[in-house]
Image (cartoon, rainbow, N blue to C red):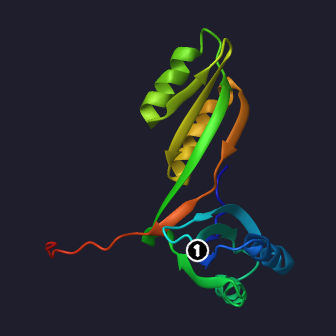
Amino acid sequence: MARPVSYHTLVMLVENKPGVLARVAGLFARRGFNIHSLAVAPTENPALSRITVVADTESTPVDQMVKQVDKLINVVRIDELAPEDAVEQELLMATVRAGAGDRSQILELCQIFGARVLNTGSTEIMVRLAGSPGKLDDFEDLLRPFGIVAIQRTGTVALPRLERSAATPR
């Protein structure tokens, strides 16, 4: 599933309380923002969760989205991450038809992409791949001709890219 041409990755730190995710998602829905991907999990601080939203911004400027979300009471911080300033990862699990003649080709694709086989059946193989959203798109496209029985993607998670400096750590 390829990303929309004009998308933005928003990363929010929110209070880890019931209903916060519903309020954030509700705001996006009320404002007509199309969410392409959504991932949420607790952070290193158990009082906070990190929500990563990849949103289509063709109809609404990103600065308006940020201002609206920032007004929510449980949002501690919100940042937009430009693709070149972020490390983005996603997880894909797929069950693929794998007849006797196709197994070796599917296993070769897994080896090329660094995917792992999670489960095998008599006519199907379940695989997992973690990587950039583009890498997962490519892998999914190559699996499709074999027959994808079921597929699940986690949605993008992202953190700011680390700065590189010539200074040596102490």
The image shows residue 46 at horizontal and vertical percentages of 55, 70
The quarter of the displayed image where residue 161 is located: bottom left
The quarter of the displayed image where residue 126 is located: top right
Q: Is residue 107 above or below residue 34?
A: above
**Could you tell me which secondary element the residue under label 1 belongs to?**
strand
Could you classify mark 1 by the number of other residues whose Cα lies within 10 Å: few (under 14), some (14-19), or many (20 or more)?
A: some
The image shows residue 15 at horizontal and vertical percentages of 64, 78
Q: Name the one closer to the observer, 39 or 37.
A: 39
The image shows residue 28 at horizontal and vertical percentages of 78, 75
Query: Is residue 137 visible in this depiction of the protein?
Result: no
Residue type, label 1? Leu
Q: Quadrant of the C terminus?
A: bottom left
Q: Residue at x 66, y 26 (%)?
A: 96
The quarter of the displayed image where residue 5 is located: bottom right
Left or right for 81, reference 64: left
Query: Is residue 1 visible in this depiction of the protein?
Result: yes
The total of numbered circles placed on residues is: 1
